[in-house]
Amino acid sequence: MARPVIGLTTYAEEARFGLNDTFAAVLPLSYVHAVHESGGGPS
């Protein structure tokens, strides 16, 4: 049986990656850990 696809709600926040400022979709890392620990992963 295939794993279900679950979307995680994010919000846009200005972020800096190296020298670049950009808007990024962000969410608490605890959400990512919880999904991973329950068997979820990127698709």
Image: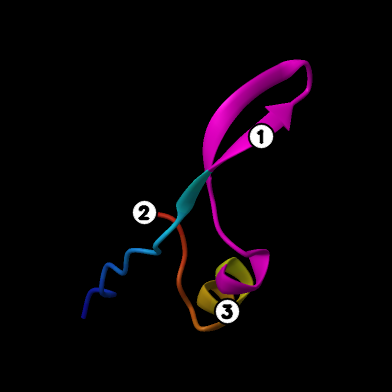
Type of residue at label 3? Ala
User: Principal SS element in the magenta part?
Assistant: strand
Q: Which residue is mark 2?
A: 43
Residue drawn at x 66%, y 34% as measured from the top left: 15
Is residue 16 placed above or below 43 in the rendered structure? above
When the figure is inspected, residue 38 is found, relative to residue 20, above or below; the finding is below
Name the image quarter holding residue 34. Answer: bottom right
Q: Which residues are magenta?
A: 13-31
Residue at horizontal 23%, vertical 74%? Answer: 2
Q: Which residue is mark 1?
A: 15
Residue type at mark 1 is Ala
Question: Which residue is the extreme one toward the top?
Answer: 19
**Rendered view: 16 above or below 40:** above
Tell me the SS state at disc 1.
strand
- Which residue is labeled 3 in the image? 34
Task: Find the distance from the CA under tag 3 to the CA under tag 1.
Answer: 23 Å
Q: Is residue 18 left or right of residue 13?
A: right
Q: Quadrant of the N terminus?
A: bottom left
Q: Residues within 10 Å of mark 3 (few under 14, many from 20)?
A: few
Give me the C-alpha separation between circle 3 and circle 2: 16 Å
Query: Which sits earlier in the primary sequence, circle 3 or circle 1?
Result: 1
Answer whether labels 3 and 1 touch (C-beta < 8 Å): no
Q: Earlier in the sequence, mark 2 or mark 1?
A: 1
Location of residue 20 (image quadrant): top right
- The structure residue drawn at horizontal position 47% and vertical position 52%, both measured from the top left corner, is 11
